Image (tube, grey):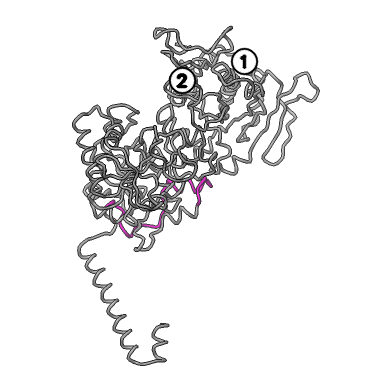
Amino acid sequence: MAIFSRCSETKPIFVAIYSIGGVGILLSVFFIISSLNSSGYTPFASFGSPLGRKDKTSPFLTDAISNGGNQDNSSMSKGSLTLSNSEKTIPIWKLPTGSKFPKLETFKLTKDMVKSHAKDNVIIVTFGNYAFMDFILNWVKHLTDLHVYNLLVGAMDKKLLEALYWKGVPVFDMGSNMITEDAGWGSPTFHKMGREKVFLINAMLPFGVELLMCDTDMVWLKNPLPYIARYPDADILTSSDQVIPTVTDDSLEVWQEVTGAYNIGIFHWRPTEASKQLAKEWKELLLSDEKIWDQNGFNDLVHKVLGPTVQDGTTSNGGLVYTYDGTLKLGILPASIFCSGHTYFVQAMYKQLWLEPYAVHTTFQYAGTDGKRHRLREAMQFSDPSSYYDSPGGYMSFKPRIPKSLLLGGAHTVDSHFALVNYQLKQIRAALAVASLLKRTLVMPAIWCRLDRMWFGHPGILEGSLTRQPFLCPMDHVFEINVMLKDLPEEEFGPRVEFREYSFLQNPSLPKHVKESILEVDTCDRNSSNCNPSNITRTDQQGFLRLPKNSTQHELVQLFSSYKDFKVIQFSSMLDVFQGFSDKDMEKKFRNRVQRYVGIWCCVMLRDPGHIYYDMYWDEKPGWKPEPPHSRQDDHPPWA
């Protein structure tokens, strides 16, 4: 209207021109829409998310939003919007309409599908089977929270394909017919999954898009695309297992100083002739020998030629090196900000160098997939359903007490490390016992270590790394998290003691009614005049009581049965709280269970075996010392 109004004030010929142009545009739009409708074309049919769906959020996200979780609600709502066509984005977290699952052909990987999801000709891809459903949802959520939507997920089994479709996640069928269970690191199925990655890269590079390929056990903490765009001449940018920094800023690693393997959990491919040739030879290499691990195969190929540095007179290519056939230009992403499980969880390298991390990949960890999930939870980087943050039985926590001499005194040795960890184990053992009696979920404390854990002999920490001593070590350095989550028979091991990560009570996903409902408990001398547990001080939803030291099983159960309305019971200490089980059968089952909760420290240098078993009941064995097994015949846990 404004256009025609202005035209009427000038020359009539402009009115005619604008009128004709407007009518032409309307006719063109009508013709295009009619053509699409008549052909049955649906813009998002490539991954089964048709137009006309209801404006409804995924249950996964609805759950998180209602939980007031550690997610930006505004960003999630934006993530479910269809942005402008010029941005070439596809709506994510939008539920499809109807109840019928489309034909499998709908989910076939095609050039049109990839192009429709790409932005600035870049597509971000991960893949997996149903066992990694929660990791995949977490991966997608982190990207959409960062307003990055040009992503696709490859489904290796139909169960995952259907589940992601119904949650509004862009998914394609890899046709792998993979099992739906966790394959386990190093298993034949694990290697098969790795090979699928190589096949996928070979399938997608001919589409002419840049490919940022990721494992599902990593998360994005910052939009990586601007960083990758800084190196337009790189054929490949790869992460690595480097644990010693070669740079102190956010530039690429100095390739001459990188000793760690190139890790293919995060790497970016441009569709150049050199990268296509490498991908082809990589695939052929793996097909020629099923024993070759995909990552080793990649490293072998790119190390056939290594050097010289790419020189073109600019700083934008700093760090690129000629590799493979002498023409492929490779850059190694800095491990300080494209973090491994060691540089992020152990060294916290990015903090020490005052950098912002882009990603963390849960490598260098223990306890399998359960250990990976727990590490991300410790870092508050894993999205769980609201039920995880509101257990019906409530929670229990305690503040560890550690003498300064154990934490900071003397040299960092195997003996001082075990003295520190064992002192904490005794308190955790008591806390597990009390939590089992009160039928509450235990919030584990943060654990201090003096020595790092590796799978090979080392001098305590990796030389040249930024690991500080002592340091807060991941729980899987000491505990067998996978065993703690295992359904052991109750007739032999008693009921499972539920637990949460040490950061649980600080997680923004914790509901307000849980966070504010706390009963603080302090211990006191039972002969003291003011040591009366029935005298509880209440303020709104919070309370405080004094508990007699060395309380019995009966006293604890009876006392705290009156305070079930409190969501969190927080002990000021676990020292001298619990006298011990009076029910000997219950105690026997509890001991059977928690003895299996602890793992090993590894490893003493120049010893075989060199690992040392943690012992939950070390204090009951006079003269106990942290020593490796004397021989392979003696190599078994203390309870075996």
In the drawing, does residue 120 fall left or right of residue 559? left
- The amino acid type, in three-letter code, at marker 1 is Gly
In the depicted view, which residue is nearer to us: 91 or 248? 248
In the image, residue 58 lies in the stretch drawn in magenta: yes
The residue tagged with tag 2: helix, strand or loop?
Answer: loop
Q: Dot 1, crowdedness within 10 Å: few (<14), some or many (≥20)?
A: some
Which residue is identified by label 2? Answer: 602
Which residue is identified by label 1? Answer: 580
In the drawing, does residue 347 fall left or right of residue 149? right
Region of the chain picked out in magenta, as a range? 46-72
Q: Residue at x 24, y 65 (%)?
A: 37
Q: Position of residue 15 (x, y in %)?
A: 34, 88
The residue tagged with tag 1: helix, strand or loop?
Answer: strand
In the depicted view, which residue is nearer to us: 365 or 350? 350
Q: Residue at x 30, y 81 (%)?
A: 21
Q: Quadrant of the N terminus?
A: bottom left
- Answer whether labels 2 and 1 touch (C-beta < 8 Å): no
